[in-house]
Image: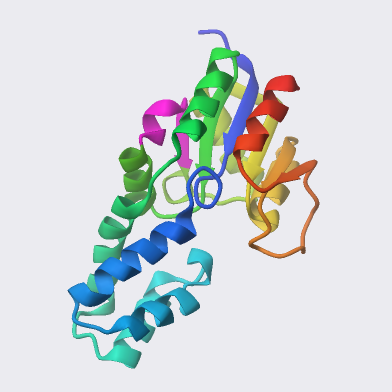
Amino acid sequence: MAVAERLACFDLDNTLIDRNASFVAWAEWWVPKVGLGPDATTWLTDHDEGGFKPREVLFAGVRERFGVEASVDELVAAYDREHPLFTWVEPEVLDGIGALRTAGWRVAVVTNGGVVQQSLKLEHTGIDKAVDYCCISEAAGVRKPDRRIFEIAAEGAGSTLGRGWMVGDHPAYDVAGGINAGLRTIRIGDLNGTGGPVADHQFGSVLDAFGVILAS
């Protein structure tokens, strides 16, 4: 099989999907399920830190603050199975991925996270079937911004890093990682502050990224 020279890498959370909105939806479902009041939903969203707080720390705080009886391990395991079911992808995002592939681009998801939760998100949204390859850091044994995770993604997608892009929301992981891999970069949104390297482009929505990549 010939190796494609054009590779488009995308982050998953808060890039292809609205991870933060899905967390709120999960919290609003979970809180009454375990018998807690609305203040627990507020506490969870206030302490989630966009998903970057370790889940063990988050749920240890839930147990301490609200007296939930389940162990931290049980709470984390349940969350990893449940939260993905509250994720969704906009049809226009899948259309954009399809347009890239039709134009000859190989498309890979490159996401930091655990295999169980990230795999379920990809499966639940159908993104796993829309792209050429999904690279999850826990399975790869390396995390963004390390160049090696992009090398793994490129090989899995049947491409190279020579003429490619990295699209993501986090400057220290996605933008820095793309730069480390020699990729052009597009940052989505401004949720993670202004520190870190500056992307080649920055947009409020991933939908704006597809046209830039197609035109390159």
Q: Is 41 displayed left or right of 73 in the figure? A: right
Question: Residue drawn 64% across and 55% down?
Answer: 170
Question: Residue drawn 50% across and 46% down?
Answer: 12
Residue 180 visible within the image: no
How far from the left and from the top, in percent, is residue 34?
Answer: 19, 77
How far from the left and from the top, in percent, is residue 180?
Answer: 73, 44
In the rendered structure, which segment of residues is drawn in magenta? Answer: 126-135
Q: How is the image coloured?
A: rainbow
Q: How many marks?
A: 0
> Does the magenta portion include 98?
no
* Quadrant that contains the C terminus: top right
Q: Is 106 displayed left or right of 82 in the figure? A: right
How far from the left and from the top, in percent, is residue 123?
Answer: 32, 39
Compared with 45, 84 (above or below) is above
Residue that extends furthest to the top in the rendered view of this protein: 1
How far from the left and from the top, in percent, is residue 118?
Answer: 39, 49
Q: Residue 106: which quarter of the image?
A: top right
Compared with 161, 86 (above or below) is below
Residue 68 visible within the image: yes
Q: Residue 171: which quarter of the image?
A: bottom right
57 or 98: which is nearer to us?
A: 98
Question: Residue drawn 26% across and 67% down?
Answer: 29
Compared with 205, 41 (above or below) is below
94 or 4: which is nearer to us?
A: 94
